[in-house]
Amino acid sequence: MDFDRLTERIKDINPAIDLHCFKEIDSTNTYAYYLGQQKYPEWNIVFAEIQTAGKGRLNRKWYATRGKSLLFSILLRPQIPAEDVQLLSLFMGEITRQALQNYLHSGNLSGFSLQTKWPNDIYLNGRKLAGILIKTAISSKKFDFVVAGIGINVNQNAQDFPEEIRHSATSLLREFGKDFSLEEIFTQIIRQLYEAWPDFIRFPQNILPIWKKNTLYLHQRIRVHHFDSIVEGTFVDVNAHGHLIVRNENGVLEVLSGDIAGESAC
Ligand code: BT5
């Protein structure tokens, strides 16, 4: 990866965006969090070719392959209530989904299904293509800063994935049978996130109707892995904070975080 060229392309979007590039790092999220603590302004972005300790939620791992995965974290300082953190997750997922879709359409690719999955995944043709990890620093119910880490499988083939995720994960290469440019995809995503950001900060709830158009399992029976228990029911909606609303025989439940799966997949 030519880091100078990548930086130039990102500066073309807006000179205020600062890019920190690494050939190898433990986790881009950890470094971006450190930048947040050091009072760096928002839109400092950490980009890495590979991570030695890539993280998912709840201490899970994020697997990647050098030169074949996109791995980056964005430092943000949103002036929205901290209770709307889930809206930020939905915003990141939906705008990244749109950017990927635009990129694929511009390459004349069609006939695929690219969807978000509450709260923070992107699925391509039914398998996980990308994951988003949001880490916050909050004081007095406001965000001091937020780190949004995004991992996308681009050019991995089946053998590049560890056995445990070989069937549940996919990459652009696996679905379309060709290589894609990490640089182009990254630039497109940052451009769309940067351009959509001011509106999101002004009216965070406006992301909800847009997000609902392309999300998996809405109005379907699901199981939610919610901490140590499993809740079953129909995914009827998300509320104004982006929390999941599930209806079942016992009533209506509000789920703040967790993992969802279609009933047959559990
Ligand atoms: C996520 O967590 O999906 C968030 C992943 C965020 C990764 C980015 S990369 C840049 C930044 N720096 C970091 O250290 N992290 C962020 P979660 O929903 O908990 O999903 C994790 C689970 O997804 C794992 O337990 C595996 O089952 C599966 N998984 C791991 N790597 C995968 C991959 N490359 N593709 C698809 N699934 C994967």
Image (tube, helix red, strand yellow):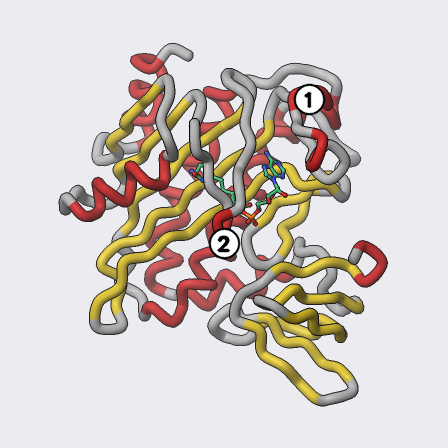
Disc 2 from disc 1: Cα separation: 28 Å
The residue sitting at 67% across, 60% down in the picture is: 260
User: Of all residues shown, which one is farthest toward the right?
Assistant: 264
The residue sitting at 27% across, 33% down in the picture is: 14
Q: Secondary structure at mark 1?
A: helix
Q: From the image, which quarter does the N terminus lie in?
A: top left
Q: Secondary structure at mark 2?
A: helix
Q: Quadrant of ligand 1?
A: top right
Crowdedness near tag 2: few (<14), some (14–19) or many (≥20) residues, C-alpha within 10 Å: few
User: Of all residues shown, which one is farthest toward the front?
Assistant: 228
Could you say which is closer to the camera, residue 235 or residue 55? 55
The percent coordinates of residue 94 (x first, y second) are 55, 50
Q: Quadrant of residue 46?
A: top left
Could you say which is closer to the camera, residue 188 or residue 77? 77
Q: From the image, which quarter does the C terminus lie in?
A: bottom right
Q: Quadrant of residue 228?
A: bottom right
Crowdedness near tag 1: few (<14), some (14–19) or many (≥20) residues, C-alpha within 10 Å: some
The residue sitting at 62% across, 20% down in the picture is: 155
Three-letter amino acid code at disc 1? Leu
Number of numbered discs overlaid on the protein picture: 2
The percent coordinates of residue 154 (x first, y second) are 60, 25
Ligand 1 closer than 8 Å to label 2 CB: yes
Q: Quadrant of residue 47?
A: top left
- Classify 126 as above or below 254: above
Q: In this image, 200 relative to 118: left or right?
A: left
Query: Is residue 95 visible to the viewer in this orientation of the structure?
Result: no
The percent coordinates of residue 77 (x first, y second) are 26, 53
Three-letter amino acid code at disc 2? Leu
Q: In this image, 222 relative to 244: left or right?
A: right
Query: Is residue 127 visible to the viewer in this orientation of the structure?
Result: yes
Q: Which residue is mark 1?
A: 173
Q: Which residue is mark 2?
A: 58
